[in-house]
């Protein structure tokens, strides 16, 4: 492409079909809305009932939206999700692996009952979704996979060895799939969100000392707003990032550099 051919159209997702796991709540909802505002139809497998909130937001954006109540860790579920998206929209161009859970306990209490479900959702389901999507994307010779990593893809953290282990695993999966799929016109990247003001972090934000520790450690001097994630999502899903592959993009207000 010649530099004169570049335009904002390279950020457009018009006509694209996207899957966002867990995309009707929290950060996932911001990923969904970002893709929709850029023009994509979005398919959301989720356990969460949001009372039609996300459907209403996407109707406003004027794109297609489907939700499927399904446990993506169940046997055969990822293949069913891909089939359902293809049936609804005719194909899959973008996959965002956002569904994730966190269980916290003292290290001596953190056994297999906490570890196993976190590995199943955070890592194995993301792998299986990517595996199913890759088969279709290879056939069409294009595609974008965006995995949702974390600061704990780089750091250790207290209270959840499975969180750091699965999020480091997500970074590894991103690089391995990028390496293998790059030759098929498919890019696989990750977004590592920093500290975001969501219901999950309400308790930490209400604790004055914990709140100050995080804000002081963040060069931006504030918590992230979920809307801060939307630009990175559109970029990594769009042709504007076609030569970006295997990258873990921190969206953290600079937290990791301090
Ligand atoms: N909230 C943060 O500050 C933060 C920071 C860094 C990374 N992350 C990551 O971002 C992602 C989204 O986090 P969030 O805070 O929006 O979470 P959330 O708890 O608000 O939403 C989780 C979503 O995952 C879905 N989900 C969970 N288990 C599922 C299963 N078995 N089958 C189908 N769907 C399932 C739920 O339905 C829900 O929609 C996660 O991967 C999380 O690790 C979050």
Image: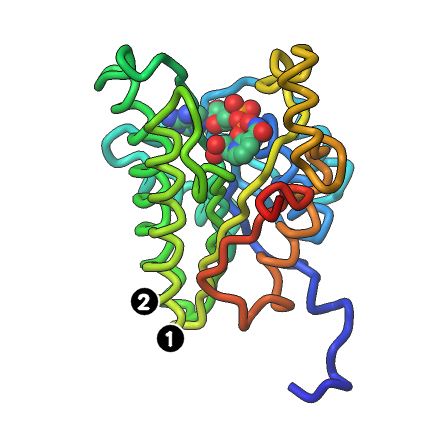
Q: Is residue 224 visible?
A: yes
- Nearest the viewer among 75 and 101 is 101
Q: Quadrant of residue 216?
A: top right
Q: What residue is shown at x 70% (from left), y 22% (from top)?
A: 212
Left or right side of 50 for 140: left
Report which residue position mark 1 lands on: 183
Q: Quadrant of residue 186?
A: bottom left
Alpha carbon of mark 2 to alpha carbon of mark 1: how far?
Answer: 7 Å
Q: Quadrant of the N terminus?
A: bottom right
- Nearest the viewer among 106 and 144 is 106
Q: What residue is shown at x 34% (from left), y 27% (from top)?
A: 161
Q: Is residue 22 visible?
A: no
Q: What residue is shown at x 53% (from left), y 67% (from top)?
A: 244
Q: What residue is shown at x 38% (from left), y 59% (from top)?
A: 175
Against 62, residue 176 (above or below) is: below
- Determine contact: label 2, label 1, CB under 8 Å: yes
Disc 1 secondary structure class: helix
- Residue 42, percent across and down? 58, 43
Q: Quadrant of residue 198?
A: top right
Report which residue position mark 2 lands on: 180
- Residue 94, percent across and down? 51, 54
Left or right side of 215 for 122: left
Left or right side of 115 for 250: right
Q: Quadrant of the C terminus?
A: top right
Against 249, residue 204 (above or below) is: above
């Amino acid at each position: 492409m010649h530099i004169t051919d570049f335009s904002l159209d390279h950020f457009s997702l018009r006509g694209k079909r996207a899957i966002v796991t867990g995309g009707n709540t929290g950060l996932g909802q911001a990923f969904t809305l970002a893709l929709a505002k850029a023009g994509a139809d979005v398919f959301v497998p989720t356990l969460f009932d949001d009372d039609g909130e996300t459907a209403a937001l996407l109707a406003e954006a004027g794109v297609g939206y489907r939700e499927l109540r399904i446990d993506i860790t169940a046997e055969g579920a990822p293949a069913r999700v891909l089939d359902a998206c293809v049936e609804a929209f005719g194909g899959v161009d973008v996959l965002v692996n956002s569904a994730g859970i966190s269980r916290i306990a003292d290290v001596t209490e953190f056994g297999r009952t906490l570890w196993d479900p976190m590995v199943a959702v955070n890592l194995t389901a993301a792998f299986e979704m990517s595996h199913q999507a890759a088969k279709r994307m290879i056939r069409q010779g294009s595609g974008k996979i965006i995995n949702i990593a974390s600061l704990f893809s780089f750091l250790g953290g207290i209270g959840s060895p499975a969180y750091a282990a699965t999020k480091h695993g997500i970074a590894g999966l991103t690089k391995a799939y990028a390496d293998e799929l790059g030759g098929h016109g498919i890019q696989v990247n990750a977004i590592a969100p920093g500290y975001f003001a969501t219901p999950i972090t309400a308790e930490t934000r209400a604790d004055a000392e914990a709140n100050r520790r995080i804000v002081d450690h963040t060069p931006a001097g504030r918590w992230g707003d979920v809307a801060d994630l939307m630009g990175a999502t559109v970029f990594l899903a769009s042709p504007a990032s076609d030569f970006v592959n295997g990258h873990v993009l921190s969206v953290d207000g600079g937290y990791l550099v301090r």
